[in-house]
Image (spheres, rainbow, N blue to C red):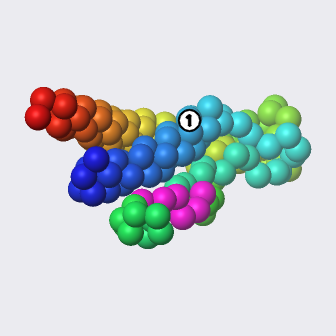
Amino acid sequence: MSDDLRFAKVSAIAALSAQSTRLRVVSENLANATSVAETSGGDPYARKTVSFKQELDRATGVTVVRVASIGRDESPFKIQHDPGHPAADANGNVKMPNVNPLVEVSDMREAHRSYEANLQVVRQVREMTNDLIELLRAR
């Protein structure tokens, strides 16, 4: 396999891993979009965020993308007035998660597209490598 093909494959595989993590975090956010605190006045589920970084793959010398961190969205929680709710505070307000399902679905679509594009790169590298092997055999 040529160096260019190997570098493309290493880069695409790293990106697949990063996007897979991103999809997992988005799934967690969607699953917990209505998860409130178990105690009165407590904090509900806080939306998670994923940050990426460029990193040098020492084995190949290729710069790849990796997950830098999984953080917590610091935006304020939504407040919903529901005095009968077990998680309501003294004023009858319940803190709701700061998860916006529309944002999460949009993020999921973007991560999915990126994942698919990188998967296609891996497939193309495999196909080109097989073609190269067949050409060498034909000599």
On screen, residue 56 above or below 94: below
47 left or right, relative to 103: right
Question: Outermost residue, right direction?
Answer: 39
- Tell me the residue at 34%/48% (across/down): 9
Q: Is residue 117 visible?
A: no
Residue for badge 1 = 27
Q: Give coordinates of residue 5: x percent, y percent.
A: 26, 50
Q: Give coordinates of residue 126: x percent, y percent.
A: 29, 35
Is the stretch drawn in magenta largely helix, strand or loop?
strand
Kind of element beneath mark 1 = helix
Q: Give coordinates of residue 57: x percent, y percent.
A: 45, 65
> 21 or 4, which is in the foreground?
4
128 left or right, relative to 9: left
- Tell me the residue at 38%/69% (across/down): 61
> 86 or 36, which is in the foreground?
36
- Tell me the residue at 80%/43% (across/down): 37
Question: Outermost residue, front direction?
Answer: 139
- Image: magenta residue range: 65-70
Q: Is residue 69 visible?
A: yes
Q: Quadrant of residue 56?
A: bottom left
